[in-house]
Structure formats: C-alpha cells, structure tokens
Image: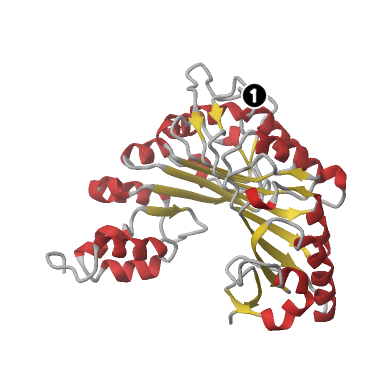
Amino acid sequence: MKDDPVFPPELFAIIIGALAGDLETLRSCALVSSTFYGLARVFSHLRVGPLVDREHDFPQFYALLEGSPPFAARVESLRLCAKWQWQNPDRWITDADLSRCFSLLTSLTRLCIAVDDGYLPWPRLSHTNRHSIQAILPTLTCLELKTVCELPLALLSHCSSLRSLTLDNVIFADSLGAVADTDSCCSSIHLRYIVLRAHATDLVRFVDWVTDPESPFDISGLRSLECTTNDQRSHPPIQRLLNASLGLQSLCIKNHSLTDNLHELDLRQLAHLRTLALDIGLDGLLSLRNFLFLPPQQSHIALLLDVRTQDERTDIMQNLADADHILCRLPFETVTVIVRTWYSKAGRKEKLIDVCDEFVPAMPLLASKPGRTDRLRILESILVQ
C-alpha cells in the first residue's frame, strides 16, 4: 500500500487526525500498516499520575523514557494529573523529579498540569521543579493549567513560542513577579487560542496584564477565545479582550448571563468573526438582544446556542418563541440550537438528534427568513447508555 496507495496520503492524514482523541482506535490503526503507525503517533500524547495509572509510579516512567530514547523522542504532549487535598495532598507531583523527565522529552511542545479536588499551590512545588517547568516554557506551543493557585503571572512571559493558552480555575499570586525570574523575559508572544475559566478578579488581572502596552503578549492576531464565567463583573474585561483581538474568528462564552443593557457586548469591531457559541440557560435567550453586531451585509456569523434546561416541552417551546423575535433581527448566517434537558457529567456519552419538526414551528420568523434554507437547526442531546 505504501508503494502504490489507493487513496492519497493526505486523506489518510485527515482521517487519522479526526481520531486524535480516540486512543483505542488509533492503536488499532497503528497495527494496520507502517504508514498508519507513523500518522497515528500513538505515543505522542501521554498522561501521567495516580489518577491515570496506579500500577506504575513516576520513577518507572523515568526508566521507560531512559530505556527507550526513540519512544521519549515521540512524546509531544505531557499531561500531569494530580489530586490536591489540604488534609491528604497527593505529593507525587511535588516530589517527582521533573527535570529528569523533561530532559528526555526532546520533542515536547505541549504541557498540561491538571489538578482535581483542590488547588495545587505553585510555591509547594520544589524550587527545582519550578525551575524545570520554567526552563521548558520557551519550547512550548501549548500550555494548560487547571486548578493551580498562587501562580505568578510573570511566569507566562517565558513562553516565547506559545500559541495556545488554557487557564482553568487558576488563581494568581499577589506579586506579578513572584517566584519567576523576569529578567530574561522575551517579547512578542503571538497567542492564537485562549481558554479562560476564571473568577472575575483573576480574569481582570490577566486581562490587565496581557493588554498592557508593555506586556510581552500580542493578542491582536488571536483567532479563538473561550471564556467561562458566572459573574457579571467578568463582562468588562471580556470586552477589553475583544477590543484588543480584532482578528478574532471564533468566540465562545459559557455560563453566559447578560441580563441587562449594562452588560452588553459590542462585537462591531470584529469584522472577521465567523462563529459565536453561547452556553446559556433557556431563560437567558432574551439576553441576546444585548449584543451589538455589524450590519447584516458585513456580518457572516454562525450562532451556536447550547441551551440548558429542565423545563417541560411546552415551556421550551414558549422560550424559543420569545427568542424568535430577537434572533430574526440579528445578522446570523445560521443558527443551531442544542437543547440539553440534563446536566452533563464527565465521561457520560451523548448523541444529538434532530428535533426540528417539534420545535421549528415555535420559531417561524427565523425559519422563514429569506436566504439559506438551512438557516435554523434544532438538535437535542440525549444520553447514550
């Protein structure tokens, strides 16, 4: 097949790429042919920690890397998974010899530190481990931090190659330069993707820093922004991020709660915006009137509404009917509504079914709007047993 392929290699690359999160299928593909083995890169993404594997410890992981340099050279992404409870902290992540590990991962470009059941205090990591993490930051293109507290913002200034940044429930240290050595900070870090799940105070501190004229970050070319917030005080800093990211193409806001005109979002400067995704309660649909858009002839936005509710079907119909009067006047190319009548939990599988026949009659204005015949889609998420 390698010498005389039936299909072009690019097609195989696309198919394998679509399976990036399905390790079991990728392993099966890797056994089919040497071509698939190279594309599947089954050892390129590793997760380490007791939450992932209680049968092997971190020293055994070192031994595996040291015993197989080709294996270590394949690793592009490393996810460190830990639990942190003040009464019974998971100490492996503080005691692990990360410098020994990182020195073997010569192709590492993505690092994730994910903490469950509590906050990992950054100063609780040993000085050696903090220094080891800081030392690899310039080579990373993707950094994800989940539930870490007392993190010095200045640490991020060492990420000279960073393109994607995820800060999930991160609490920053009081001092901007605490712990991190800022003397060698670089400039012009061109972020393309940002995911923020933060309390209002930490969101404000992050936005103050990245939008400061002297900040090493340049977000003018930002393509995708995702923000999760439960606090209306978060909307002014989100607006400031939007004002500094005029090339933005995709905007996702989760736990959206714009309920009055004091918290409107002005999107009129985002001429390149193509996707607006909102995770919103059913009773919050009317808050869409608080968004300001470019005129229809200048706007080409696909709206995705992820609507959460436990209401009866008749109440869902009524809320959609109320929203119809607003949506029909807004400049959306397409509108997709996903109705969730259950609250998602990690690991639960779902599938989407088309319920247009049931709910579209509640939205006649949007459904009959001139132009595209596929302007409105309504789907329902159901659990898969």
Q: Is residue 15 above or below residue 318?
A: above
Which of 296/55 is in front? Answer: 296
Please tell me whether mark 1 sits on a helix, a strand or a loop. loop
Q: Position of residue 142 (x, y in %)?
A: 47, 42
Q: Position of residue 288 (x, y in %)?
A: 78, 55
Q: Quadrant of residue 174?
A: top right
Residue occupying the point 57% across, 25% down: 179
The colour scheme of the drawn protein is: secondary structure
Marker count (numbered)? 1
Name the quadrant of the C terminus: bottom right
Q: Quadrant of residue 327?
A: bottom right
Q: Is residue 183 above or below residue 21?
A: above
| Horizontal side of residue 14 vs 51, given as left or right | left
Q: Is residue 28 above or below residue 191?
A: below
Dot 1 corresponds to which residue?
212
Residue occupying the point 82% across, 71% down: 321
Residue positioned most to the top: 183
Which of 257/326 is in front? Answer: 326
Name the quadrant of the N terminus: bottom left
Residue positioned most to the left: 3
Residue occupying the point 85% across, 52% down: 259
Q: Is residue 252 visible?
A: no
Q: Tell me the crowding category of disc 1: few under 14, some 14 to 19, or many 20 or more residues within 10 angstroms, Cα based.
A: few
| Horizontal side of residue 248 vs 11, given as left or right | right
Which of 370/379 is in front? Answer: 370
Q: Position of residue 39 (x, y in %)?
A: 29, 59
Residue occupying the point 61% across, 79% down: 353
Q: Is residue 101 above or below residue 383?
A: above
Q: Amino acid at mark 1?
A: Asp
